[in-house]
Image (cartoon, rainbow, N blue to C red):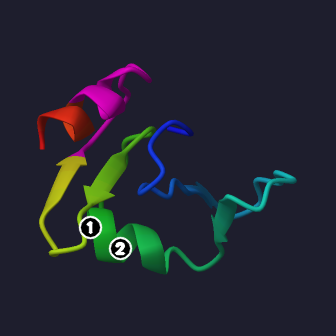
């Protein structure tokens, strides 16, 4: 994602995961998960949110190269 200058990527992890990266945010009380993914129990969910509010959401595991391909199509 580094080659896309107008894109910011964050990783949101469940409580108790410890990563030492500024782009990793801990969802301590599960509010981000509830807001963006409801009660989904799948690992590896993602959401792409555009400046105009449109979004693409995927539940479950995915291939890393899937996201840049989706962004190019938009």
**Dot 1: element:** loop
Left or right of 27 in this view: 51: left
**Dot 2: element:** helix
Residue 50 in the magenta stretch? The answer is no
Residue 10, relative to residue 60: is it above or below?
below
Residue 27, relative to residue 59: is it above or below?
below
Left or right of 59 in this view: 26: right
The image quarter in which residue 63 lies: top left
Q: Position of residue 32 (x, y in %)?
A: 45, 74
Q: Which residue is mark 2?
A: 34
Q: Quadrant of the C terminus?
A: top left
Q: Residue at x 76, y 53 (%)?
A: 17
Using the rendered image of the protein, determine whether residue 27 is visible from the camera's viewpoint. yes
The residue range painted magenta reads 58-69
Q: CA distance from mark 1 to mark 2?
A: 4 Å
Using the rendered image of the protein, determine whether residue 40 is visible from the camera's viewpoint. no
Q: Position of residue 21 (x, y in %)?
A: 80, 54
Neighbor class of circle 1 (other Cα within 10 Å; few <14, some 14-19, many 20+) is few
Q: Residue at x 77, y 62 (%)?
A: 22
Q: Which residue is mark 1?
A: 38
């Amino acid at each position: 994602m580094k080659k896309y200058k107008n894109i910011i990527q964050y990783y949101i992890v469940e409580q108790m995961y410890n990563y030492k990266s500024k782009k990793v945010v801990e969802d301590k009380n599960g509010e981000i998960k509830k807001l963006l993914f409801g009660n989904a129990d799948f690992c590896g969910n993602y959401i792409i949110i555009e400046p105009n509010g449109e979004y693409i959401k995927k539940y479950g595991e995915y291939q890393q190269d899937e996201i840049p391909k989706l962004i190019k199509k938009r």
